[in-house]
Image (spheres, rainbow, N blue to C red):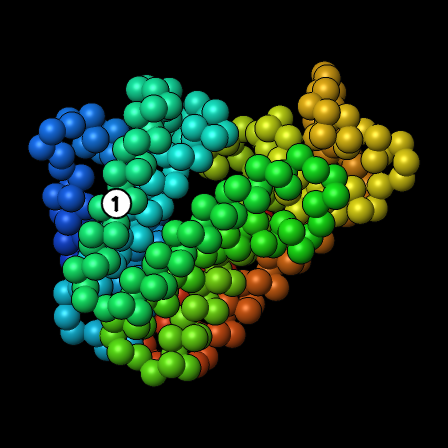
Amino acid sequence: MGLDEASVKPHERLADHLAEDMAAVDALIRERMVSQHAPRIPEVSAHIVGAGGKRLRPMLTLAAAEMCGYQGAYHRHLAATVEFIHTATLLHDDVVDESGQRRGRPTANLLWDNKSSVLVGDYLFARSFQLMVETGSLRVLDILSNAAATIAEGEVLQLTAAQNLATDEAIYLQVIRGKTAALFSAATEVGGVIAAAPDDQVAALFTYGDALGVAFQIVDDLLDYGGNAAATGKNVGDDFRERKLTLPVIKAVAAADTEERAFWSRVIEAGDQRDGDLDLALSLLAKHGTMEATRLEALDWASQAKGALRALPEHPIRQMLNDLADYVVARIS
């Protein structure tokens, strides 16, 4: 394309490689968003689907299927399924979090209302199950339905864990494995399953998606305390203001003295936040080195993702997925 390949981001190279399949997936999504009786469904759906984003999850399904030699068309159904599940969870998340902005745009619940967001999210979940059933694969249905249940479970767990100082790193990992990594790993795993790949390759695809998803969420949580608002679409400290216990704070709480723990209890558990509290929180994260420790954990998960790829066939996509794991954590380098 006349561009130095090194200057093109890995997800952009992947998108370019999968452009024909992604165009077909987009057409399938638009077709299945249509509702004969409830015009608000395509209105709300189109708002969030059209909001941009990298479309990593459906691309991972297409990439896994191609890398494993799939020649059919159902990988597109599965990619659309994954995107519908993801979109449904975003609609529900914005209601739960009372969010007003996503990817720099007003959220659906702000433009319409909470009822519309919840019900359209339910509709997209139903559509996702219709799509996955059409593949005729019970194993695919098992993987994706389990992922949908795990995502919901992770979100419910976060409700009780996010503002409880007793939440440790194991619980945090369980939460992010549910709310984020479960769909990444399902997206890659079903790509291998639909291609009838050997069990060791399907397992490697699962491991890659799981580790990539964990790294992705850890980085997102880290960027909340040190990212660029224009790049992330979030304001620095949003998680702090929403009283979410994420990994940098969990590490700081574990290292806190009595006075520091009282501070975290006031701002996170009691929700009593005052002017200057975010700056104090940032200073405590710096004091205990929790930002760097969290960054190293994200790098370790990215390394695990790359290690899983070694069990997969030699293919141009394999290098793109390797580079994608590096890119996910390069945002914090």
Q: Residue drawn 57% across and 41% down?
A: 158
Q: Is residue 327 left or right of residue 263?
A: left
Q: Going by the picture, which residue comes out furthest to the right? A: 258
Residue 251 visible in this rendered orientation of the protein:
yes
Quadrant where the image shows the N terminus:
bottom left
Q: Residue drawn 9% across and 32% down?
A: 36
- The amino acid beneath tag 1 is Ala
- The image quarter containing residue 315 is bottom left
Reply above or below: 36 against 142: above
Residue at which label 1 appears: 126
As helix, strand or loop, the secondary structure at mark 1 comes to helix
Locate residue 62, reporting x and y percent. 26, 63
Locate residue 54, reporting x and y percent. 35, 47
Reply above or below: 323 against 280: below
Q: Residue drawn 65% across and 51% down?
A: 171
Q: Is residue 100 left or right of residue 49?
A: right
Residue 191 visible in this rendered orientation of the protein:
no
